[in-house]
Image (spheres, helix red, strand yellow):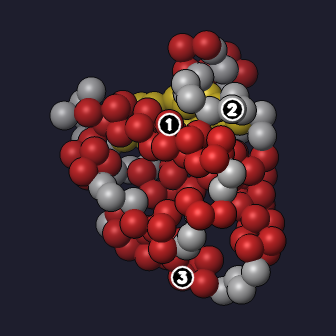
Amino acid sequence: MTLQEKEQDIIDEFAIYDDWMDKYEYIIELGKELPLIDEKLKTDNRLIEGCQSRVWLHTNFDGEKMQFSADSDAIITKGIIALLIRVFNDESPKNIASSSLRFIDEIGLHEHLSPTRSNGLASMIRTMKMEALKQV
């Protein structure tokens, strides 16, 4: 599945919900379903700077594709990083670095986040793209 197809799947899933409270509930569910990362990976050097809540990001590059895992102490933030991981996992660093992540605007995520959460989202994206650029 291409990065664009993964984004479209998310757009289609969010289109089911009319109300943003339902969309928040869905984001919370995604956060609860995010696989737990090893506690040993929750180190200061894996914390994403610029997030109000604590978000730990672990990256792996197998020579072709990137894999990400993450955790957060805030359930909404955990759901947001779960969406980003879903799109970026098993993608090439080049695809990640050049992606526009149109799904974020298409589902209305930016406009429904508080300014601090919106800044956190930008920090998560920037960090994941920077990790990919290290491999290009």
Q: Amino acid at mark 3?
A: Asp
Neighbour class for label 3 at 10 Å: few (<14), some, many (≥20)? some
Residue at coordinates 59% horizontally, 64% vertically from top-left? 111
Residue 135: x and y, percent?
24, 30
Neighbour class for label 1 at 10 Å: few (<14), some, many (≥20)? some
Quick check: 88 left or right of 119? left
Which residue corresponds to mark 2?
Answer: 52
Image position of 122 with respect to 102: above or below? above
Q: Amino acid at mark 2?
A: Gln
Neighbour class for label 2 at 10 Å: few (<14), some, many (≥20)? some
The residues tagged by marks 1 and 3 sit, at their Cα atoms, a distance apart of: 25 Å
Residue 66: x and y, percent?
37, 41
Q: Amino acid at mark 1?
A: Ser
Please identify, in this view, whether the residue under mark 3 or under mark 2 is nearer the observer: 2
Which residue corresponds to mark 3?
Answer: 12
Quarter of the rendering occupied by the C terminus: top left
Which residue corresponds to mark 1?
Answer: 123
